């Protein structure tokens, strides 16, 4: 790991005028609003590596037409949330795990890593500055979007020498436009999103943009909200969520099952949390193993399917 930036060096540049906050009856479209401030940390190999972190007014920045991110998608992102509790405290949901996962994406892309706990403290300070943006409504939150991009300006793939990591935030309600209701999933066995020993477990933009055509097909032809990705009929994940199935298995056991982390699916933080909680409760069998979509169909036809649901930071826990 390159010498990291330190939260103790964090600078805050105040905005001259704050944006008006939404009213109590505002309907939050996911990601439509952005808060007043952002966190920004630059990396410059020829200038000592990581630069001091800055909380500054949320504003655009320029990219050269030869910027390597525009040409080669040297980019990764994360999604976390801050909530207002019933006793009016502000908490973040396991954001340290998001920054741990982000470092894995950095390693894949060749962007230098950072100390996740220094980043966590910088993020906490940003949330503290912007806590008045957290909607005081059930099932609403402040969505945190950490992002890293390469800032080198050249045509040709080579070592990353300049990068920018930033966090923007957005007050949000339900992820899906129809609200907190069950979603319909589309399967296309002719398209493969990820494969073993590939990059499907990294949260990089290149894993998402090519999937949009299949998602559009599912919506336009079948009215589906998302895609359930398969590999040789084995269930992988939903476009924005890890998939869980709760059924009575063929041995007559109540079982919660989800696909394993074999490099084809994202190691979701909500996924990990659900597995930990369900194993602690010990109310039914919890399995992490491969299973085929035909097993889901058979269980449904035989009346053994209790429910299926997706889990992810944006969608939280969403029934199928």
Image (cartoon, helix red, strand yellow):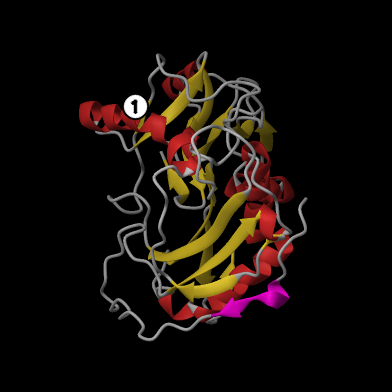
The quadrant in which the C terminus is found is: top left
Tell me if residue 184 comes above or below residue 82 in the rendering. above
Residue 174's place in the image compared with 276, above or below, is below
Q: Nearer the viewer, residue 156 or 297?
A: 156
Say if the magenta span includes residue 11. yes
Judge left or right: residue 82 versus residue 53.
Answer: left
Task: Please give the count of numbered marks on the rendered protein.
Answer: 1
Q: Where is residue 197 in the image (x, y as percent from the top left)?
A: 66, 23
| Residue in the picture at 48% in, 40% down | 205
Most extreme residue toward the left is: 220
**Is residue 307 at least partly visible in the picture?**
no
Is 190 a magenta residue?
no
207 or 156, nearer to the observer: 156
Query: In the rendered image, is residue 286 in sight?
Result: yes
Residue at x 32%, y 38% (from the top left corner): 225
Q: Which of 233 and 113 is in front in this view?
A: 113
Residue bounds of the magenta highlight: 7-12
Say whether residue 67 is left or right of residue 100.
left
Residue with the mark numbered 1: 214
Q: Where is residue 150 in the image (x, y as percent from the top left)?
A: 54, 47
Give the image location of residue 26, x and y in percent.
26, 71
Circle 1 crowding by C-alpha within 10 Å: few under 14, some 14–19, many from 20 = some
Nearer to us in this view, 61 or 20: 61
Residue at image x 53%, y 34%? 245
Q: What element carries label 1?
A: helix
**In the image, farthest residue toward the bottom:** 16
Give residue 12's position: percent from left, percent from top.
56, 80
Q: Is residue 255 left or right of residue 293?
A: right
Residue visible at 60% across and 51% down in the picture:
162
């Amino acid at each position: 790991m390159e010498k990291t930036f330190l939260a103790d060096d964090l600078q805050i540049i105040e905005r001259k005028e704050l944006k008006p906050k939404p009213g109590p009856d505002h309907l939050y479209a996911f990601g439509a609003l952005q808060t007043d401030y952002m966190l920004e940390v630059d990396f410059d190999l020829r200038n000592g590596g990581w630069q001091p972190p800055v909380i500054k007014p949320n504003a655009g920045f320029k990219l050269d037409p030869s910027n390597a991110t525009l040409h080669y998608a040297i980019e990764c992102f994360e999604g976390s949330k801050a909530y207002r509790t019933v006793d009016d405290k502000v908490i973040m949901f396991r954001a340290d795990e998001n920054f741990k996962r982000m470092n894995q994406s950095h390693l894949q892309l060749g962007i230098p890593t950072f100390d996740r706990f220094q980043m966590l403290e910088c993020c906490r300070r940003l949330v503290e500055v912007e806590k008045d943006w957290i909607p005081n409504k059930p099932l609403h939150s402040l969505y945190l979007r950490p992002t890293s991009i390469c800032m080198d300006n050249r045509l040709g793939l080579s070592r990353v020498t300049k990068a920018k990591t930033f966090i923007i935030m957005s007050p949000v309600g339900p992820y899906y436009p129809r609200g907190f209701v069950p979603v319909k999933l589309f399967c296309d066995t002719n398209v493969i999103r990820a494969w073993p020993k590939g990059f499907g477990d990294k949260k990089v933009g290149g894993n998402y943009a090519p999937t949009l055509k299949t998602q559009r097909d599912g919506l336009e032809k079948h009215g589906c909200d998302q895609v359930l990705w398969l590999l040789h009929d084995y269930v992988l994940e939903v476009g924005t969520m890890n998939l869980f199935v709760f059924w009575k298995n063929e041995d007559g056991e109540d079982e919660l099952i989800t696909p394993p982390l074999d490099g084809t699916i994202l190691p979701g933080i909500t996924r990990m949390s659900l597995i930990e909680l369900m194993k602690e409760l010990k109310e039914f069998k919890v399995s992490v193993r491969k299973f085929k979509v035909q097993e889901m169909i058979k269980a449904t036809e035989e009346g053994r399917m209790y429910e299926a649901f997706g889990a992810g930071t944006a969608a939280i826990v969403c029934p199928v």
